[in-house]
Amino acid sequence: MTSIDCHRLRPVLVDLAVGTLGYEQAEVVLAHIEICATCRGDLATMRGVATELRHPAAPTPPDEFWQRQRTSIMRRIGVEPLVERRPTRRWAIAGALATAALALLLVRGHFRAHTPAPAHSIDRLDDDTLLHLDDLLPAFVPAGTLDDADADAVAANDAAVAWPGEEPDL
Amino acid sequence: MDDAALIARARGGSTKAFESLVERHQRRIYGLALRVLRDHDQADEATQRSFVHAWEHLGAFRGEASFATWLHHIAMNECRDMLRAERRKVALDDVPEARLASGGELTIPIGRHLGALVAELPARQRSVLSLRVLGELPFADIARSEGISENAAKVNFHHAVRKLRAWLGGKTE
């Protein structure tokens, strides 16, 4: 083939190099290459360059890399990533305090409901209890004690007590 | 939902739709950037810049090529800019002080890896080569994206490869 033939062959040679040439055309080109050192060299170079350029330089990065890269790209175009925001320290403290206060109230309510009132606390006794104590009173006072009291002594005692605004009967 | 529908929503201001597009394409764009730049952090940065650029210029996307092709174009440009910046930095670091003092002409050394050489190619050739080899796009898509015929795309690819071969010392153009 002449140099003009080589010139015309170039696109086909490219197809052959990148593997997109049909079988019949490839046969023709390969026949030419056997007798043409220039085209043979071109084909070898094209294949070599493609192999060299395609040679992977590093393993594929993990998924986290792609996510981070996307986030960075979006940030560069003015889009902040939507992330789940953690509560601030102030809100966390307020929440803890509110929880503690609620717990305190519940505990206090529980003890109020289940702790019996002290016997000596008259304010906390209802009427039924008071009546009950009245009923018990005779048991602590010996029978006839009050009836046998000296009426005169009682009167004298009363007279000795000075009530506000009164003069004692002496 | 396909890319077209997501793009329409994103154009309407839906960042959620755009995020879906990012999620769908970020791996390929990163892979492309990594092949060119050969550095994880730089590839990550190039990927992010590419999507930011895409968001800012979404109105310019006419849909003649696929969104993926358009993104690959953007990513290649970002990679090229980063490589140039890196080379400038390296070149200055490598220059002997005596030479700097004498004001001698700075010669920026050709990058050590092929990705850097690709960045030196003429724009059309670089674009076609990158989209084909790194983006693994069919020539038909590349041709639509570049506004050229499929045959012209292949010829550009061929020229790009021959140029790389010459730079690598295989033979001269």
Image (cartoon, grey):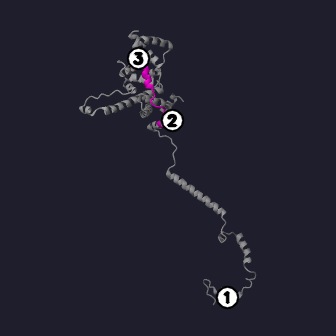
Residue A76 vs residue B100, the one in the foreground: B100
From this view, report whether residue A97 is shown above or below residue B11.
below
Q: Distance between the residues labelled 1 and 3?
A: 145 Å
Q: Which segment did they paint magenta?
A: A44-69
Dot 2 amino acid type: Asp
Mark 2 nearby-residue class (10 Å; few <14, some 14–19, many ≥20): few
Which mark is nearer the camera, 3 or 2?
A: 3
> Amino acid type of disc 1?
Ala
Residue A120: say if magenta: no
Q: Which of B78 and A132 is in front in this view?
A: B78
Q: Horizontally, is A165 left or right of A134 in the view?
A: left
Is disc 3 in the same subunit as disc 2? yes
Q: Which residue is drawn at 72% across and 69% down?
A: A128
Circle 3 residues within 10 Å: few <14, some 14–19, many ≥20: many
Q: Which chain carries label 2?
A: A
Residue type, mark 3 in image: Asp
- Circle 2 residue: A63
User: Which callout, 3 or 2, points at the residue further toward the start of the chain?
Assistant: 3
